[in-house]
Image: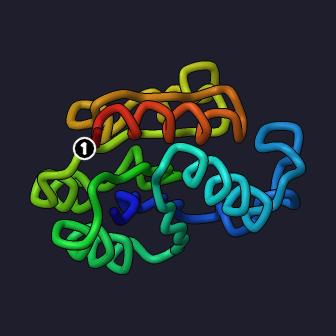
Amino acid sequence: MNAAKILVLNGPNLNMLGLREPEIYGRETLDDLNAKCVEKAAKLGLEADCRQSNIEGEMVTWIQGARTSHKGIILNAGAYTHTSVALHDALLASELPVIEVHLSNIFGRESFRHHSYISPIAAGVICGFGSLGYDLALEAMAKQVA
């Protein structure tokens, strides 16, 4: 039996993890985070397909493609969380379960970060726990796709 494939999608500036504002986002790199996700997913009987883009349209294309190739989406849309109706619409069209993740507590930061176009359509939101949030999201997704 094949493991359920989960798209773990990271948005703009997450390629700068470990370098950009480590006091907020931590010292782990995106490669570190992806390796942890792949390992955790395997333990849960899932396959993590980890991707990152700074380009909104590319993210939309990947989400649309996931509709037929994946069983769920874990999304840290970065700044697009607060601005992208396009990501919102693509997620709806995918008809897949979505879990929103943020490394920092977006509600403890600037007020413009308090609004999310993703949250209303997500099965859940995990924020403020650093990379542990991805582990928690994978555990929750394993239950969503079981």
Farthest residue toward the front? 1
Residue at (38%, 31%) from the top-left corner? 115
Q: Where in the figure is residue 41, as x and y percent of width and height?
A: 55, 51
| Structure colour scheme | rainbow
- Asked whether, in this view, residue 100 is left or right of residue 87, the answer is right
Residue at (35%, 53%) from the top-left corner? 73
User: What amino acid is labelled 1 in the image?
Assistant: Pro
Badge 1 crowding class, 10 Å Cα cut-off, few under 14, some 14 to 19, many 20 or more, is some
Quadrant housing residue 128 = top right
Q: In this picture, is 17 found above or below 26?
A: below
Q: Where in the figure is residue 142, as x and y percent of width and height?
A: 40, 39
- Asked whether, in this view, residue 92 is left or right of residue 46, the answer is left
Q: For the C terminus, give its image quadrant.
A: top left
Q: What residue did someone put label 1 on?
A: 97
Label 1 residue SS: loop
Quadrant housing residue 116 = top left
Residue at (51%, 26%) from the top-left corner? 111
Q: Where in the figure is residue 77, as x and y percent of width and height?
A: 46, 53
* Nearer-the-camera pick, 6 or 16: 6
Residue at (28%, 31%) from the top-left corner? 123
Q: In this picture, is 78 found above or below 26?
A: below
* Nearer-the-camera pick, 70 or 113: 70
Q: For the N terminus, give its image quadrant.
A: bottom left
- Asked whether, in this view, residue 89 is left or right of residue 54, the answer is left
- Asked whether, in this view, residue 69 is left or right of residue 7, the answer is left
State the count of labels: 1
Q: Where in the figure is residue 99, as x and y percent of width and height?
A: 38, 39
Q: In this picture, is 113 found above or below 55?
A: above
